[in-house]
Amino acid sequence: MGTLILAVISLFLYSVGTALQALSFRGRVHTSPAITGLVGVLALIGHGLLIWQTVHHDGGFDLGFFQSSVLISWIIVALLLALGIRKPVHNLSLAIYPLAGITILVLLATPSSPRLVADDNYGMLSHIALSITAYSLLSLAAAQAVLLYFQNRQLKHNYNSPLVRNLPPLQTMESLLFEMVWAGVVLLVLAIATGALFVNDLFAQNVAHKTIFSLMSLAVFVALLIGRYTKGWRGTTASRWTLTGCALLMLGFYGSKFVLELVFQQPG
């Protein structure tokens, strides 16, 4: 199946999934989570086939700026759907599905030269896989933190808004956030550890900024978890720390890839 056809199918399904969730959120329709989940799974399949055609090449994987973005958005959707089986995270699709669609559109609109990682370089591939999964999960945590921030703010002002009516209780939202942060921190530690093992020099010119920002982000998340269990941090405080940690992580990854690959035309 052609790349364009797969992209159109994926975009259509993500649009349908977003529309169904938005209508359900506003109380216009009562859509079963199974139906919205099925639409999401079909979109994920189309998205995955598109990745296979655009990211996978003979002899390696193209992990350039736009290709990495499409891959990360796919993993975020996959994590969302997996969590949605047991956790009340369906409303996150209102942000995640459009984000996935945007990465697909940008990939199609911006052709670039392949930047291959050899498919027999298992150590490097394991480091990249752990890094991308950690980025994806912590990005999902950031979306959860945004919802938690606004929910907490509106509850304090006694607003009876659709946001408050449709979200799970505040304690449940906080528990979900910290579960995501815990899992993300474990993956990030493993990613840094495999980088130390398989990357020749973590502080070489082209990866020093990624390493530094990753370590700074890890420090923020660890401080958040310590604050949670020693000082009872929650609500707005937890949201702000989560968003700060995610911003540092994304700045290290996307900021460095943007500058190196798109500005200086160097390997990212």
Image: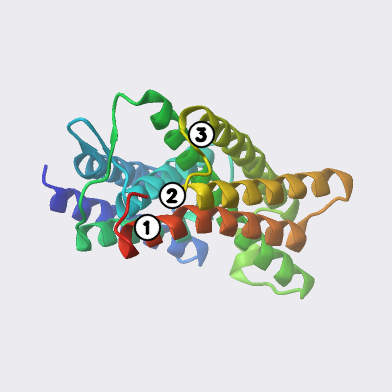
Residue at point 65%, 51% (across, down): 216
Q: Residue at x 31, y 62 (%)?
A: 262
What residue would you read off at disc 1? 260
The mark that comes first in sequence, 2 or 1, is: 2
Mark 2, residue position? 206
**Residue denoted by label 3:** 195
Where disc 3 sits, the SS reads helix
Q: CA distance from mark 3 to mark 1?
A: 19 Å
Q: Are marks 2 and 1 in contact (CB under 8 Å)?
A: yes
Left or right, 26 with respect to 74, comes to right
Q: Identify which amino acid the numbered label 2 is placed on.
A: Asn
Q: Earlier in the sequence, mark 2 or mark 3?
A: 3
**Label 1: few (<14), some (14–19) or many (≥20) C-alpha neighbours in 10 Å:** some
Q: Residue at the spot x=52%, y=59% of the render?
A: 251
Badge 2 crowding class, 10 Å Cα cut-off, few under 14, some 14 to 19, many 20 or more, is some
For the residue labelled by badge 1, is the local secondary structure a helix, a strand or a loop?
Answer: helix
- The amino acid pointed to by label 1 is Leu
Above or below for 41 versus 146: above
Left or right: where 137 falls relative to 43: right
Mark 3 surroundings: few (<14), some (14-19) or many (≥20) residues within 10 A: many
Give the CA distance from mark 2 to mark 1.
8 Å
> Could you tell me which secondary element the residue under label 2 belongs to?
loop
Q: Quadrant of residue 14?
A: bottom left
The structure residue drawn at horizontal position 32% and vertical position 44%, both measured from the top left corner, is: 63
Along the line of sight, which residue is nearer the eye, 179 or 92? 179
